[in-house]
Image (cartoon, rainbow, N blue to C red):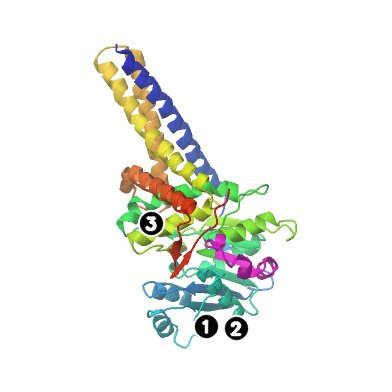
Amino acid sequence: MPVGLLILTSFCAALSLVCGTYFGVVIHRMRRTARRLPTAADGLSLPEPEGGWPPLCVVVPAHNEADVIATLVRSLLEQDYPSLRVVLALDRCTDSTEQIARELIGEDDRFEIITIDSCPDDWAGKVHAAHQGVTRSIGAADAELLLFTDADTRFEPGLCRAAAALAIKRDLDLLSLLSQLTCDRWYERVIQPAAGFELVRAYPLDVVNREKSPRAFANGQFMLFRRGTYDAIGGHERMKDALLEDIAFARYLNKHRETLGHPTWGVYLSGGLLHCAMYRSWPDFVRGWRRIFTEAAGRRPTSLRKWAWHQRLFNLLCPGACYATAIAGLVLVLRHEMLVIGSVAMGIGAICAGIYHVAIARLYRDQSVPRIWSLLFPIGAWTCSRIEAKAAADLASGTATTWAGRSYVREVRT
């Protein structure tokens, strides 16, 4: 038997075992998270809190969202929360966002529209719009709960009630939900699952929600604050230069736990009650995820490069080694050379490949993407690794990022 084939088989078998172990742990943590953490849907069955439903105000910062604002407004009109107010903070809109919103709202006095003509140079646009929505609106003035959401989301009718009930029952200062992302476009099916998996890998929900030493994370698509905590933080003014204010809020809460009286937060799945169409074109998708990965990595080019190579190792090289191991083992068996070694290699490759596919299939199922698209997961992983690598290069070179009509040069952190 050629020594080279034996060495190659042994190397690939070792990588296969790494793959099987890694994705076996992924499956275990997915199941454990599903067992231990509630979803927003669990709040639907909770009773009305003692003392009644506290006033809740939804604040929506929006910049040129004519394509999606109707979907959100309709879903908010259908909310069954008794003490609900909604503030649309329209930030320098030059399209028909305001016209569409006003036509849909009609005479519904729960809604309020605030128009914003300018943004200070030292503020991020979305953060400034959210701040204006809170400080200038009548609806937010007496709200005990403040809910910040994005214009590209869609609420199921009971979401506000379910989220408020869940936050009150679990005594949370901040409840953030992960939405169910749309999968209508090709990149939402091929690339988006890998991008979402990478973000959850960096911020696993079981680690984010643990009591001791939680990892700071929140999702800006849905952040429900207790008003007292929001004010104690300093509101959006505290995060005025943050491109990802959600993670900035979470990190501030985590860093100042003792000063703020040990606030509690929960980051849960929406259970199908919150939907989001994040990006409406491929260039926006790439630009958006580059921004997300940059901020999630703490603006550290080294971390972004490590993330990129992590994807290439565990999501590409190791799964590929499973197939190579199985094929090499089959060759040994067919050539009647070292049948035992060949059979073991085939078994290792097949079992570890099976574990990998079970994990990826569950990932696609949880994201409501047809599982047939999981066959293209390696393409998504490779593309995400390139987005991360480009984000690292842009950050290191001081290349500005453009978002919502403004350009920002981000400070590199070590």
Mark 1 vs mark 2, CA separation in Å? 8 Å
The dot on residue 160 is none
Q: Is residue 82 above or below residue 289?
A: below
Q: Is residue 306 above or below residue 141?
A: above
Q: Which residues lie in the magenta part?
A: 223-246
> Label 3 belongs to which residue?
286
> Label 1 belongs to which residue?
112
Marks 1 & 2, CB-CB < 8 Å contact: yes
Tag 2: amino acid: Ile
Residue 216: image location, x then y, percent: 60, 53
Residue mark closest to the camera, 1 vs 3: 3
Residue mark closest to the camera, 2 vs 3: 3
Under tag 2, what secondary structure? Answer: loop
State the residue in front, 303 or 381: 303
> Label 2 belongs to which residue?
138
Residue 213: image location, x then y, percent: 66, 47
Under tag 3, what secondary structure? Answer: helix
Q: Which label's residue is closer to the chain start, 1 or 3?
A: 1
State the residue in front, 14 or 349: 14
Q: Which label's residue is closer to the chain start, 2 or 3?
A: 2
Other-residue count near label 3 (Cα within 10 Å), few / some / many at <14 / 14–19 / ≥20: some
Tag 3: amino acid: Val
Residue 212: image location, x then y, percent: 68, 47
Q: Would you say residue 237 sits in the magenta stretch?
A: yes
Asked if residue 22 lies left or right of residue 137, the reply is left
